[in-house]
């Protein structure tokens, strides 16, 4: 297409939504998308996926082209095509999702060797599907590299919600207990380190044997209250 034909097609698409004009524009510049895609891969499957992303870039360029600028469509569309392909590159080629910027930096040698090794594992799928945990003995294996013991954002929120629910249910189960029973439960069972019987007995003014009886009775009542609120007996055993 010459410059005038390009302008006519762009005007028809932008002003009237003429799909035939858009198709003509895209078909005449499809080679641009395929050429950009071929720069990044020689895998036929990946090439088709990246070229399809490049075509999306052409479509966006057609919709956003500023007709006041005296430039050819191919010049303007080049950025859109490259941007769409580069954004899809890591997603298309990597076994494990990694940020596009990280993938490109690894390709350009801007990362440390350790970081590049991690990117290669994500892209090439270097972790054998049949490897066993025994292969990781001594540390430094794929499991240590790819698996984090830290909770993810969703797991953190879920754990916080679960903790808040358990705290509320425990507080409700303690309410029917006497003040003495609730105090013993808190100091003997709900602290990281339980207080010794002698200290609690002295402070409450009762014997240690009496304190043990109070604790036993309080635990029985607490378990019953928790079961009534939905706790499993197996959890409380």
Image (cartoon, grey):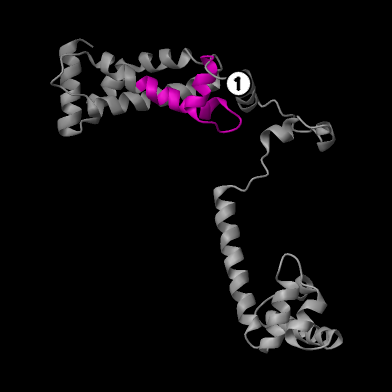
x%, y% of residue 227?
71, 80
Kind of element beneath mark 1: helix
Give the residue furthest to the left: 68
Residue 52 visible? no
x%, y% of residue 225?
69, 83
Residue 210 visible? yes
Over which residues does the magenta segment extend?
A: 81-109
Residue drawn at the location 63% of the way across and 22% of the way down: 120
Q: Is residue 96 magenta?
A: yes
Q: Is residue 166 above or below residue 57?
A: below
Please tell me how many numbered marks the rendered image carries.
1
Q: Tell which of 121 and 10 is nearer to you.
A: 121
| Quadrant in the picture for the N terminus | top left
Q: Tell which of 27 and 181 is nearer to you.
A: 181
Per the picture, the main secondary structure of the magenta-coloured stretch is helix
x%, y% of residue 158?
58, 58
Q: Tell which of 188 and 60 is nearer to you.
A: 188
Q: Is residue 184 above or below residue 155?
A: below
Side of 87 where 78 appears, left or right: left
Side of 184 where 106 appears, left or right: left
Residue on which disc 1 sits: 116
């Amino acid at each position: 297409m010459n410059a005038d034909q390009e302008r006519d097609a762009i005007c028809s698409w932008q002003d009237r939504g003429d799909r035939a004009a858009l198709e003509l524009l895209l078909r005449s510049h499809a080679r641009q998308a395929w050429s950009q895609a071929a720069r990044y891969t020689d895998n036929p499957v990946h090439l088709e996926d990246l070229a399809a992303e490049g075509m999306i870039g052409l479509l966006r360029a057609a919709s956003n082209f500023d007709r006041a600028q005296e430039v050819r469509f191919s010049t303007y569309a080049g950025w859109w095509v490259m941007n769409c392909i580069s954004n899809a590159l890591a997603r298309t080629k990597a076994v494990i999702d990694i940020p596009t910027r990280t993938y490109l930096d690894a390709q350009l040698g801007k990362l440390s060797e350790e970081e590049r090794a991690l990117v290669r594992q994500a892209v090439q799928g270097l972790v054998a599907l049949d490897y066993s945990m025994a292969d990781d003995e001594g540390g430094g294996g794929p499991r240590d590299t790819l698996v984090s013991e830290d909770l993810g954002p969703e797991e953190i929120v879920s754990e916080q919600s679960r903790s808040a629910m358990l705290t509320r249910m425990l507080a409700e189960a303690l309410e029917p207990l006497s003040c003495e029973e609730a105090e013993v439960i808190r100091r003997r069972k709900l602290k990281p380190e339980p207080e010794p019987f002698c200290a609690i007995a002295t402070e409450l003014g009762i014997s240690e044997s009496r304190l043990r009886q109070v604790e036993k009775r309080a635990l029985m009542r607490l378990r019953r209250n928790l079961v009534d609120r939905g706790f499993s007996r197996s959890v409380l055993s």
